[in-house]
């Protein structure tokens, strides 16, 4: 099996071996030390300040998105959301559920976010800005420099979902003046799904401490308090946190820039090799994490996904809704190599030779 989806992804053998071990009891000094190390390494990898904190939340990325909004904002806030696909729409849905005042910048699939989109919202009383730096459903990578400029001049609290971009593209919380970053285990971290991480700077921590949250499990105050001693308030996904330490140690040894360069190389290799196939890259501002592809031949996007799965045991990433037949995506994160790219290209070429693609 080859997995070119965007999560869960292919994992390195040494990470998989940790997952096969017996799970230790976690209310110990040894586990607390491991968790404090995880926090420091994660902060280093993401360019967070020394006084930033990490919330280790057992739940999906969507759980972390909702929990972050619940803990940082209240009914007096006015939020601006970039909605360029299903994950931008998810931010809007969460705000609606919690009765928060929000407006959205709606982008068509494949459309870049520009200063023109943002300038009409200058001076309009917004207090928070929500964006998925990489809209995973369409493959578009947004320009964080223009986001930084807009948010600084409007003094907005900035929340970024970097789940599918972290360790695939350059991302630095301090450089971009990000207040809260949402991450998850199953993307370029190449761990099993089940743990999400919210990195909070000093300003967002103050928000957490002074905000009233009607939730037991999602109340970040408890996580900040227990996190000081390297623990979580409730039982975490212990095995994944053990795997996380190994992964972060490897990233630290190799350097974040080298890890990103490797993903970029795999992406460039794939994009070069699809030339001549009836597939069109469907965005101009691309993340290294994924290539969004629009079929221009006989097969619709969902049919290509099904054929590769059933006939070659290869998984690409399908879309849903209105993009189901229009767009599919090929991921470049996780333990993917150029040789793996060759296997996918071979499968696509065989489909072309059979005149079915």
Image: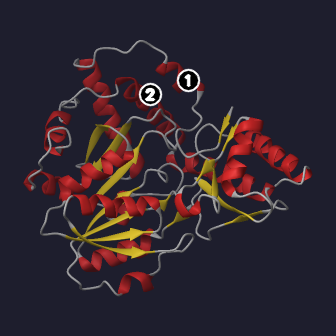
Q: Residue at x 35, y 73 (%)?
A: 104
Pointers 2 and 1 in contact (C-beta within 8 Å)? no
Q: Position of residue 155 (x, y in %)?
A: 23, 75
On the image, the x and y values in percent for residue 349 come to 86, 50
Residue 122 location, quadrant = bottom left
What element does badge 2 sit on? Answer: helix
Disc 1 designates what residue? 14
Res 81 quadrant in image:
bottom left
Q: Quote the CA–CA distance across marks 2 and 1.
A: 9 Å
The residue tagged 2 is 243
Lower sequence index among marks 2 and 1 = 1
Q: Identify which residue, 149 or 330, lies in the foreground.
A: 330
Furthest residue toward right = 353
Image coords of residue 231 (percent x, y): 22, 29
* Residue at point 80%, 43% (across, down): 342
SS at circle 1: helix
For the residue pair 105 and 38, the one nearer the viewer reads as 105
Q: Position of residue 148 (x, y in %)?
A: 36, 72
Tell me if I can see residue 8 in this picture. yes
Q: Is residue 130 left or right of residue 21?
A: left
């Amino acid at each position: 099996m080859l997995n070119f989806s965007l999560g869960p992804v292919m994992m390195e053998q040494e990470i998989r071996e940790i997952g096969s071990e017996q799970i230790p009891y976690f209310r110990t000094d040894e586990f607390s030390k491991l968790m404090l190390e995880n926090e420091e390494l994660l902060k280093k990898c993401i360019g967070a300040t020394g006084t930033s904190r990490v919330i280790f939340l057992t739940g999906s990325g969507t759980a972390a998105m909702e929990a972050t909004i619940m803990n940082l904002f209240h009914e007096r806030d006015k939020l601006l959301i970039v909605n360029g696909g299903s994950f931008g729409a998810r931010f809007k849905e969460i705000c609606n559920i919690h009765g928060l005042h929000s407006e959205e910048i709606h982008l068509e699939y494949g459309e870049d976010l520009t200063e023109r989109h943002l300038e009409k919202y200058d001076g309009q009383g917004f207090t928070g800005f929500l964006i998925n730096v990489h809209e995973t459903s369409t493959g578009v990578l947004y320009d964080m420099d223009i986001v930084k400029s807009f948010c600084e001049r409007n003094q907005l609290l900035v929340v970024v979902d970097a789940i599918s971009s972290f360790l695939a593209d350059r991302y630095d919380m301090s450089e971009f003046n990000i207040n809260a970053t949402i991450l998850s285990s199953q993307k370029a971290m190449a761990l099993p799904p089940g743990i999400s991480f919210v990195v909070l700077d000093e300003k967002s921590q103050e928000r957490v401490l002074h905000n009233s949250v009607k939730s037991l499990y999602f109340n970040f105050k408890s996580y900040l308090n227990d996190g000081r001693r390297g623990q979580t308030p409730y039982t975490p996904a212990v095995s994944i946190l053990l795997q996380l330490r190994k992964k972060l140690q490897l990233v630290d040894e190799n350097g974040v820039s080298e890890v990103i360069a490797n993903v970029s190389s795999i992406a460039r290799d794939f994009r070069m090799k699809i030339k001549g196939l009836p597939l069109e890259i469907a965005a101009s501002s691309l993340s290294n994490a994924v290539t969004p592809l629009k079929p221009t031949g006989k097969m619709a996007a969902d049919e290509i996904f099904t054929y590769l799965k059933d006939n070659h045991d290869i998984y690409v990433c399908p879309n849903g809704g209105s993009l189901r037949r229009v767009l599919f995506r090929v991921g470049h994160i996780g333990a993917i190599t150029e040789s793996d790219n060759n296997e996918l290209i071979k499968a696509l070429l065989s489909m072309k030779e059979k005149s079915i693609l």
